[in-house]
Each structure stands twice: as C-alpha cells, then as structure tokens.
Image (cartoon, rainbow, N blue to C red):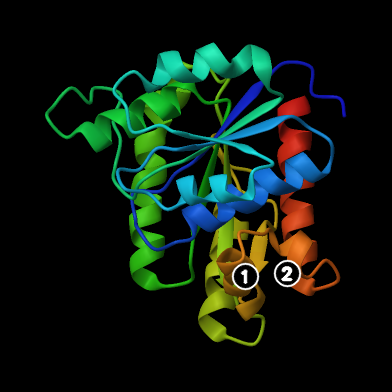
Amino acid sequence: MTVKACKIIAVVNGKGGVGKSTSSINIALDLKKKGYNVALFDGEKNGTTISLRERGDIDVYPAYDRLISQTLQAHKNSYDFLVVDTAGVNASTSSNGENLQEIINSKIIATADLVIVPLVPSPVDIRKTITFLDGLEPFIDASRGHLKTLIVLNRFRSNEKLSAEVKAYLEENYTNHPYHRFDNTLIRQSTTVEQADGLYQSVNEYAPGSLVASDFKRLTNTIISLLEA
C-alpha cells in the first residue's frame, strides 16, 4: 500500500445503465480487500449503492447533497480512498441551474482525483460516452491536468463482433489520448456479476477464481498505479 494521501475516485457517465454502481461497489470492496481504508458514497437520489450498508464492514454515506464537495473534503483525513457512485446525468463546469443532480455530479467531478467512465458495447453508448468525455475536458483543464480519466468497457463479450469493434475503437483513440485513458480496462459479461451484486459482495469475494474477478483485479491495480503516478 503506497498511496500516501486520500484519493477521490468518481464513477461517472452521463448515460445510465452502464454499470456505474456495480463498478463503484467492486472498486471499493477490492481496494478494501487490499488493506486500504475505503468509504463509498452514493451520489444518486434514491440510489442503490447505499444498500451496501447492510454488510456492516464498509462505511457507506449518502452523497445526494449540494454540499457534497465539503462532505468529501471533510472525510479525506479518515480514509485512503473515497469512491463516489453517481447518477446517469451530464455535468458541466458552469452547472448552476436547477437540476440538483447535475450540480452534484459536477461538484463530484471537480473534487475527484480520478474519474472512472464505464460504458457498454453499443452504438448509442459509445456516442453518448464520447460526448460525455468531451464534456470532461473543461474539468481537466480547470484542475491543471491533475484530474485523470480511465475508461472501462463493461459487459465485454470476446466472441461478439460489436464488443470487438468498440474495444478496437477505444484502443485506437484512447490508448495515448492526452486527457482520457483506455488501458485494456474491460470487464467481461458474466452472470457472476449480478449474482455477487445480489449478495452485496464483490465479484472477487463471490467467485475469486473467475475470469471476471481477474478483470476487476486488473482494474483495481490500474487505478492504484494511476493514482501513484
């Protein structure tokens, strides 16, 4: 364990249904399994991540609050990592309207050290994710390059043409992108993920020898490496 200062990881995409909550939970629990002190925040109104409190062995906090930036800063001295799940809405550096969820997402991104952007292999998802990634660039500029972005391809099927095409597109366009990174960070499609979710477990707790568990392990190691840099 070599991360010296608390890091905030935000799991965000303006598109819903791409696996943000599942990613948040698995990242948080895998970091905890490695011995880090981790807290999980649910930034969505009526979000489901808060239900992980039932485990009783990881701190989970509601984060649907206009004061979320102050809340996260107040917890930084108590943890190694703060993992923040968010709703599927867009964000903007100038978000000052009446949509509280957009305001919250914007504040979470502005406070984060790393933004995880999950997507699934579909034409609609890739188009909306590209637009969302473009919208993150003002946040990166405002952070003077401190904010990092990691793209995660969820529900990947190795024998499916569309999955292969989306993976190839991400490799071509985001392997050496100046803002956003895709480091072969993919999570295979597997019923194991849903089964683990239903038991409030990570995939590495539920089926540690599975291929999808190795995907999450690699993702967690990539996150740690990025935040150590």
84 and 206: which one is in front? 206
* Location of residue 59 by image quarter: top right
Q: Is residue 55 visible?
A: yes
Q: Is residue 112 left or right of residue 104?
A: right
In the picture, the disc for residue 193 is 1
Label 2, secondary structure: give it: helix
Q: Position of residue 134 (x, y in %)?
A: 38, 40
Three-letter residue code for mark 1: Val
In front: label 2 or label 1: 1
Residue located at (44% from left, 44% from top): 12
| Whether residue 193 is situated above or below residue 21 in the rendered picture | below
| Whether residue 169 is situated above or below residue 45 in the rendered picture | below
Q: Is residue 197 left or right of residue 218?
A: left
Q: Position of residue 54 (x, y in %)?
A: 57, 50
In the picture, the disc for residue 212 is 2
| Whether residue 2 is situated above or below residue 185 in the rendered picture | above
Counting the numbered discs, the total is 2
41 and 118: which one is in front? 41
Quarter holding the C terminus is top right
Q: Is residue 229 visible?
A: no
Real-space CA distance between mark 2 and mark 1, rounded to the nearest whole angstrom: 8 Å
Residue located at (33% from left, 50% from top): 88
Quarter holding the N terminus is top right
Residue located at (42% from left, 28% from top): 108
Three-letter residue code for mark 2: Val
Marks 2 and 1 in Cβ contact (< 8 Å): yes
Q: Is residue 88 left or right of residue 178?
A: left
